[in-house]
Structure formats: structure tokens, C-alpha cells
Image: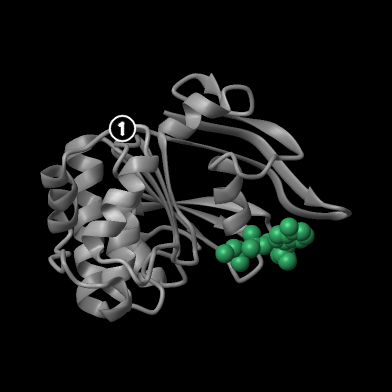
Amino acid sequence: MLKVTTLTKAYGKKTVLDQISFSVQPGEIIGLVGENGAGKSTLLNILATLQKPTNGSIHLHDKLCQKEKQSIRKAIGYVPQDIAIWEEFTVEENMIFFEKLAWKKLEIKALRQLCLDMALDKWKEPVKTLSGGMKRKLNLAISLIHDPTLLLLDEPTVGIDLKSRKEIGAYLRELASAQGKMILYTSHDMDEIIHLCDRIICIGDDPFYEEILIDSGKEILSF
Ligand SMILES: Nc1ncnc2c1ncn2[C@@H]1O[C@H](COP(=O)(O)OP(=O)(O)O)[C@@H](O)[C@H]1O
Ligand SMILES: [Mg+2]
């Protein structure tokens, strides 16, 4: 379980996140929404242990993240907003490169399967020839090499085609329900969030945040 308690982040005098508390259970997909500049990426960066909170605590599987960074990082898969892969390399070369950096070792067959699981079948193609959707899938596949329990995805579907969006959504659902992964997902697309996520956390100015419940992934109760 992920447990965030009264998390606050200020940049100088500007408070971006104000006493946010929520928890995520295994198998849950949580949507994080809010306007540009609301603090979505900041929250994901803090959860990924890349930035320090000003106040508050984060526990993952009962471990305090600020204290046990190394072991916590092994349990986290993070896909930042900007795609970070080698454009000149093929999909295969990218997967092998990032496997070398990963905590867990995987055979080439398993690396390829990770890509195939999300309908990324361009194994021998250079990344620069792939569509935006395919690149996103590769980014996601890389983040899953070490089999993390918590996935942090920052706008994974922005600017990509509808087919890839649907395939990514279906794959995330499968990861959550079959493998019990916890997924935090930011998007501008409310429709996508409503259909994909079990709960929504909205960050904004007034109030700073609220939690919205969705009934069977379809209906928003209050917004
Ligand atoms: N390193 C930083 N230093 C100062 N201000 C920052 C920094 N990173 C983000 N901010 C500010 O914090 C706010 C939230 O940014 P961000 O988390 O990127 O929002 P979002 O992802 O919701 O668009 C913005 O006003 C942004 O300008
Ligand atoms: Mg952002």
C-alpha cells in the first residue's frame, strides 16, 4: 500500500501542494487531475523520491520513503512527462540497455514479451521511426523491467493516437487487476481518466485537493 500523509511542497513562498493525504491499495489505478501548474508532476516527482517534500510523509509497503530511498526506488516505476529513450537505437537495443541499468535481470525473451504485452511489435526498428504512441509504450515497457509495485505515469497518453491510448489503457488495467500493481496516472483527458481510473485526486487552488469517487469507472459523483 502507498500512504501519503499531509504532504506539503513549497517552492520558496509558493505552496504548490498543501497537506495532501491519500492512500492507494494494490490493484488500484488513481487518476491525478488538475490544471497546468497545479502540481501533478511535482507530486509524482516526490513520490518517485526525485524531489523532497517540504513536509509530510510517504510510506510504501510500510517503509518511510524519505528514509529508505534505495529500497523504495526498486519498487517504483516512473515514466516522466518527457520521453527518455535512445532515438538512434532499436526497440531491442533500448530494452537491453535499460535492462543493464535495472535492479532485476531479464532474459531477452522476457523483455520482448513486455513489449508485445502492450502491442509494441517493432522489435528491430529504430526508435526514431516509431510513432509517438509506440515511443510511449516503449517508455512504459522500460519502466516495468524491474517489476515495480508502484507505477507513476506522468501524462502517458498526451499527443498519441487513439488506438495506442486504448491499448495502453487496457494494459494498465491488466497490470492492476492481474498483478496488483498500484498506478498513479496524470492526464488532461477527463474522459480517459473516468474510464480508466478507480478514483480521482484533483489538485487545484480552491480547494487544494479533493478526492472524487467514481462509480464503476463511469460516473463522477461530484466535481
Ligand atoms: N523546481 C521548481 N522550482 C520552482 N517552482 C517550480 C519548480 N518545479 C515546478 N515549479 C512550479 O510549481 C508549480 C507546479 O508545477 P508542476 O508540478 O509541473 O505542475 P503540473 O504538472 O500540474 O503542470 C508550477 O507553478 C511550477 O511553475
Ligand atoms: Mg506536469
**Quadrant in which the N terminus is drawn:** top left
Up-down relation of residue 133 to residue 177 (above or below): below
Color theme of the render: one colour
Mark 1 CB within 8 Å of ligand 2: no
**Residue toward you, 116 or 9:** 116
Task: Tell me what residue is drawn at x 20 percent, y 72 percent.
Answer: 125
Does residue 64 appear left or right of residue 138 in this picture? Answer: right
x and y percentages locating residue 50 in the rendered image: 61, 44
**Residue toward you, 53 or 222:** 53
Up-down relation of residue 163 to residue 144 (above or below): below
Task: Tell me what residue is drawn at x 20 percent, y 55 percent.
Answer: 171
Amino acid under label 1? Lys
x and y percentages locating residue 93 in the rendered image: 26, 58
Name which quarter of the figure residue 191 lies in.
Answer: bottom left
Task: Tell me what residue is drawn at x 24 percent, y 63 percent.
Answer: 91
**Residue toward you, 76 or 94:** 94
x and y percentages locating residue 66 in the rendered image: 63, 28
Secondary element at tag 1: loop
Does residue 96 appear left or right of residue 203 in this picture? Answer: left
Name which quarter of the figure residue 69 lies in.
Answer: top right
Residue 205 in view here: no
Does residue 46 appear left or right of residue 177 in this picture? Answer: right
Question: What residue sits right under mark 1 in the picture?
Answer: 104
Residue 179 in view here: yes
Does residue 181 appear left or right of residue 30 in this picture? Answer: left
Task: Tell me what residue is drawn at x 21 percent, y 36 percent.
Answer: 179
Q: Residues within 10 Å of mark 1 (few under 14, many from 20)?
A: few
x and y percentages locating residue 161 in the rendered image: 27, 80
- The quarter of the image that holds ligand 1 is bottom right
- Residue farthest to the right, as pictured: 13
